[in-house]
Image (cartoon, rainbow, N blue to C red):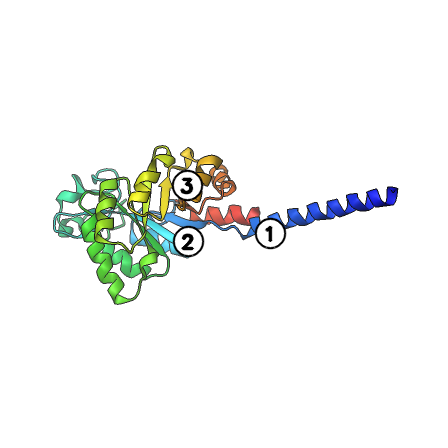
């Protein structure tokens, strides 16, 4: 009887070890997408072509940028509605023509690119998350991406359209049923589920500080990916990895890989 009891304990122990190893293996398979915030904002002036090139050099899976519609009708890649913070220009970017915008310097040495230039630079090598930052950006973004897709260098699922302006997302979905949408939110991410359903979104892009194990699971169980922003510090990166988010938006893409390799 003693032998049988010991054998049973041994068998149970082996079973527990096998379960642990299985879970460990599954954990090692987890790799969140690394998404460069405005290119590689932590290294090079945000939303510029060199910043985007730097992000690709650092091995990102995707890049997040922001777009406004300028007065002459082109989509330009810039984050702030006004120019004073990052450039030697003044005023609202939407009130300027492309010709005027191209004369402005960003942080001394860089230029404000058009969305066309960004598309040409990336050329489908990584996916592109385009945030509709300005009003009236849904239609021209749809038109530009539609013509880009016809050229064959990109596929529809290599784009994500996101915005805090949920009416712009509704408008975009009315125009385009093919390109994925992500809902940007700075509030309770669960409050974004109704609009996500309305526009048939692929993902919710929440402020990472609003995330916990419960709401991440609820979002994913509802069928949406979770791409939080903007996580730069090791503690925050580790937390997002522990929550098993689907992607991490960061100014420092290399830090995600460093944390993953150290686990």
Q: Where is residue 222 in the image (x, y as percent from the top left)?
A: 41, 43
Rendered residue at 22%/41% (across/down) = 167
Q: State whether residue 10 appears in this view.
A: yes
Q: How far apart are marks 1 and 3 (CA)?
A: 24 Å
Q: Quadrant of residue 127?
A: bottom left
Labels 3 and 2 touching (C-beta < 8 A): no
Q: Where is residue 109 in the image (x, y as percent from the top left)?
A: 27, 49
Q: Mark 3 Cα within 10 Å, few/some/many (few <14, many 20+)? A: some
Viewer-nearest of discs 3 and 2: 3
Q: Name the residue under label 1.
A: 25
Q: Mark 2 Cα within 10 Å, few/some/many (few <14, many 20+)? A: many
Q: In this view, does 220 lie above or below 124?
A: above
Task: Indicate which disc, 3 or 2, sits on the residue closer to the N terminus.
Answer: 2
Q: Mark 2 points at which residue?
A: 60
Q: Where is residue 70 in the image (x, y as percent from the top left)?
A: 16, 48
Q: Name the residue under label 3.
A: 219
């Amino acid at each position: 009887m003693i032998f049988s009891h010991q054998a049973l304990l041994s068998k149970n122990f082996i079973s527990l070890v096998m379960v642990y190893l299985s879970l460990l293996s599954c954990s090692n398979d987890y790799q969140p997408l690394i998404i460069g915030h405005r290119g590689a904002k932590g290294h090079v002036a945000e939303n510029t072509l060199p910043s985007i090139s730097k992000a690709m050099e650092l091995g990102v899976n995707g890049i997040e940028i922001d777009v406004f519609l300028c007065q002459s009708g082109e989509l330009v890649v810039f984050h702030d509605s006004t120019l004073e913070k990052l450039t030697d220009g003044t005023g609202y970017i939407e009130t300027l023509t492309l010709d005027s915008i191209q004369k402005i310097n960003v942080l001394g040495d860089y230029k404000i690119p058009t969305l066309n230039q960004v598309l040409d630079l990336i050329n489908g090598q990584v996916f592109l998350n385009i945030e509709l930052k300005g009003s009236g950006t849904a239609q021209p973004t749809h038109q530009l991406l539609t013509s880009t897709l016809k050229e064959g260098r990109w596929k529809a699922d290599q784009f994500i359209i996101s915005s805090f302006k949920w009416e712009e997302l509704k408008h975009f979905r009315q125009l385009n049923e093919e390109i994925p949408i992500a809902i940007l939110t700075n509030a309770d991410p669960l409050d974004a589920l109704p609009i996500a359903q309305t526009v048939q979104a692929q993902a919710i892009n929440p402020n990472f500080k609003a995330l916990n194990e419960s709401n991440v699971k609820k979002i994913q169980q509802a069928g949406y990916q979770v791409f939080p922003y903007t996580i730069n510090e090791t503690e925050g990166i580790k937390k997002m990895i522990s929550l098993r988010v689907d992607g991490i938006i960061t100014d420092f893409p290399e830090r995600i890989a460093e944390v993953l390799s150290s686990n």
